[in-house]
Every structure is written in C-alpha cells, then in structure tokens.
Image (cartoon, rainbow, N blue to C red):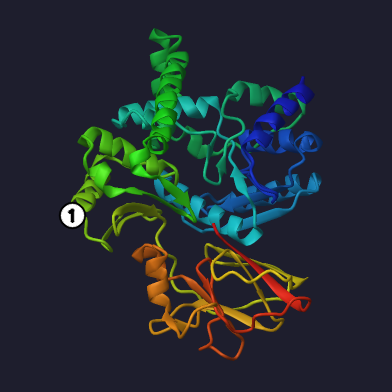
Amino acid sequence: MPDAFAALVADRFSALVEGAGPVLLAVSGGPDSLAMLDLLWAARRRHGIALEVVHIDHGIGVESHEVAARVADEAAARGVPFHLRVLELGPDTTETRARAARRVALRAVVEATGSVGVALAHHADDQVETVMLRVLRGSGPAGLAGMAPKRGIWLRPLLEFPRARLAGYLAARDLSGWQDPANADRRHLRSWLRTVALPMLEERLPDLRERLGEMADQASSSRRAWNQVPGLLPALDLADEAGTISVAAPPLRGYRSEVRQAVIAAMARRFGVPLGTRKLVRVEQLLAAGRSGTRVRLGRALEAEMAFDRLVLHRPAPPPFAPVELPTEGVVGVGPHRFRLERATATAATPRREGSGISLMPGAYVIRPWHAGDRIRPFGGTGTRPVVVLLREAKIATGRRAGWPVMVPSGDDATIVWVPGICRSDVLVPQPGEDVLRVEYDLA
C-alpha cells in the first residue's frame, strides 16, 4: 500500500537526519526523485522534518528549462519551497563533470538555506550499478561497499528499495517522471552497464544482483569496523572536533604500512573522502618526514598536515572573507564559521578567557579575518599577545589559520575583543546585571 511504503521511507529518512533545519530534496524531475518527493511529502507528519526542493538545471539538453519548470510545479503543488540553480554546462558535458558541478551547486544551496542535508534518490538498483562499476575500475575493499545511506550532508533514504518498487508507487499515485535520454545513452558507462552489461550477465547469473548486494554488505561491514579502529587504539589519542581529525604521529609511524594506511583511510572517510593508494602513500611520506607545518592536498575537499607531533586531517581553509557586520540577533555564517547572537543579561560569574561563547557590552561589531601583526589583550593577563601565537598554542593547524576570524568593534579595526573559540580580551567586559550581547561560536 502507498501509505505503508511512505511510512517506511519516512522512518528511514528521519533516522538519517541530524539537526533542526530543513532538508533539501534533490529532484531531477525523473521518476526516482519524483517518487522520493511524493513519499516524503505524503508522510511529512510522520517524520516531522521541514522539506525544501532543489533542482539543478545543468543546461545540457534543450528541454532542461522545461524540466525545471515541471519540478517547480511539483513542489508548488505540495506547498514545498523550491530552489533552482542554472549551470549552462552545454551538450558536450561528461557525466563526471556534470556530477561534480551538481555537487558544488547543491552545497551552495545548503549554505544559502541553512539546510542540514540533501536527500538523494539513489535506490537499490543504483547501488548494484555503483558496486559493479567499482569492480570494473579495480576499487579497493572500502569502495566495494558502494554508497552509504549517510555521508556528510548527503542522505539516501531510498537506498534499500528497488527501482520497481518506486515505479509501482508512482503508478499507484498516477504520477510519472521525466525520462532523461542520457540514461539510455550507451556512450555513458553507467548507462551501458544498466542497459547492456548487467542484463547480459543476468542471463547466465540470475542472482547477480543479490550476489553484488551481499558483497557490498560484507565490504560495508568491514568499512564500518575499520572506521572505528582509530578511536579504539588509545595510543593514537584520536581527537575529532572543530572540523578536524587528528592522531598522535609517533605511534602511527610504528604500525605496519597496511595498518597505517587503513587508519589514515578511516580518518579520511569521516570527511566523506575516499583515499586511494597514491594519496595514502603521500600522507605516509608526510608522516615520515614529521616536519610541523608541512601539508599535502588530498583533493579539493581534504588536506593532511603535520601539526607539532600530530597528523591532522581537515578541510582546506577557505579564502579570506570580507569583513561582516554582525546583527544584534540571529545567526550569521562566515564560511565554515557560525555565530549566534542574542540579547541577554550579564551574570555574576567571572568571564572566561577561553570558550565558544562571549558576553560583550551592546554595540556594533565586525567579524574579519585576522591579519599578520594583530594583537589582543587577553582577559586576566598582562600586556598584549600576537594572535598568531594564540592560534599556534591552540594547536590550530597551519593550513586552517589563514581564514580564522577575529571580532572587533565597528569602526575600531585594531581593538580585537575576541579570537573565537580561543581567547577573549579584557575590553568591553559587561558588569553583572547589565544588558549584554551574547555571541556563541561554532565551526562547522
């Protein structure tokens, strides 16, 4: 029954979502994503999560604008907010380039809307194709696990359900989706696999999909086990906080290369980034050299760095941002940094020098990147200290220092009142009972 299926999908969906914000539903207009939209909309009271639709118009086919308009209509018919991004990639765009551009566009919408995730309509048949493609490409054991139900912001509530079940749901609801011609174009490897290779193999091996599914389950179980290993080895002193993952370098150097690489790969997977052999070797070389401040890029989304006696993995620092005037209330995002502001009343408790929050005398304040030569008068200290020294003492890896924010009064760029998460100054400290501006800081 459609209602029972919608309830089942809603339960899978709610189990994947963390946080109180809305979730974007990536709707291409095809039958799978249309089924996801309708299923989650039909069961919206059960999962209780705010839904918004996002459509990426790649600009590849001549009909792409018409498809975008249809998706907008589907969202409007259900009273769901709609977001459109137009890319204009052109007809010669490859599958790989289109996918990368789509992911960048989706991340931008997440940033703009404050969404907590993006739901993708990948299903069980997509999983089989993904595993088979990775077999053909010589993937390692972790890659044979296929797609995860949740990885970072990407959520896949339909992953256990076959395409036929989604098609049956649409038929029962008298709905139909747009059929993308690219899905039948054998020039694309996945389309060739779906329309030619898998049907041919299934003639000889009728249970091929079940076999591939079992292989993916075994690989997934192994991957989950290895993901836990860094935290189970006390000598590594795993630290997972503020957008970084780090372990003590000396014990890691002492492991056999196979174990060392498995630990590093498990750390990278916490960022949703798979590392192949070449990148793992580069990290091992960085670890062996042991020079603090040296780092290697592991693609656009991840960087490894030696910071003192620790191997640190983190996302590359964002480019320096323009100064941002803070409101007196609300939430402000500055790259990966988040500031929540509210009016409050000062307590009698002694202000803390360190911490993720600060109470200040009301006024206008600005968040800007720290500059070489910046100094702050730490609360409870004497004299001033260079901000760069405070960042180093807080063991902020070199690669993440460039975009670190500082807070200054509007119109007084030289007086730093706070290095968020690290140190507050001794100026503009409110007295008990006074009205204050309370600022809480978080690094995504």
* Total numbered labels: 1
The percent position of residue 52, horizontal first and vertical second, equals: 70, 49
**Residue at the bottom extreme, as displayed:** 411
Type of amino acid under label 1: Ala
The percent position of residue 193, horizontal first and vertical second, equals: 40, 27
Image quarter in which the N terminus is found: top right
x 76%, y 24%: residue: 2
Is 190 placed above or below 117 here?
above
x 31%, y 53%: residue: 310
Tag 1 residue: 289
Is 208 placed above or below 103 here?
above
x 60%, y 91%: residue: 411
Quadrant position of residue 175: top right
Left or right: 314, with 288 as reference point:
right
The percent position of residue 61, horizontal first and vertical second, equals: 52, 49
- Does residue 187 appear in the picture of this structure? yes
Left or right: 158, with 10 as reference point:
left
- Does residue 193 appear in the picture of this structure? no
Left or right: 200, with 406 as reference point:
left
* Helix, strand or loop under label 1: helix
The 10 Å Cα crowd at callout 1, few under 14, some 14 to 19, many 20 or more, is: few
x 30%, y 32%: residue: 137
The foreground one among 43 and 433 is 433
The foreground one among 221 and 364 is 364
The percent position of residue 439, horizontal first and vertical second, equals: 65, 69
Is 235 placed above or below 299 here?
above
Image quarter in which the C terminus is found: bottom right
Left or right: 305, with 361 as reference point:
left
Is 349 placed above or below 364 here?
above
Quadrant position of residue 307: bottom left
The foreground one among 307 and 161 is 307
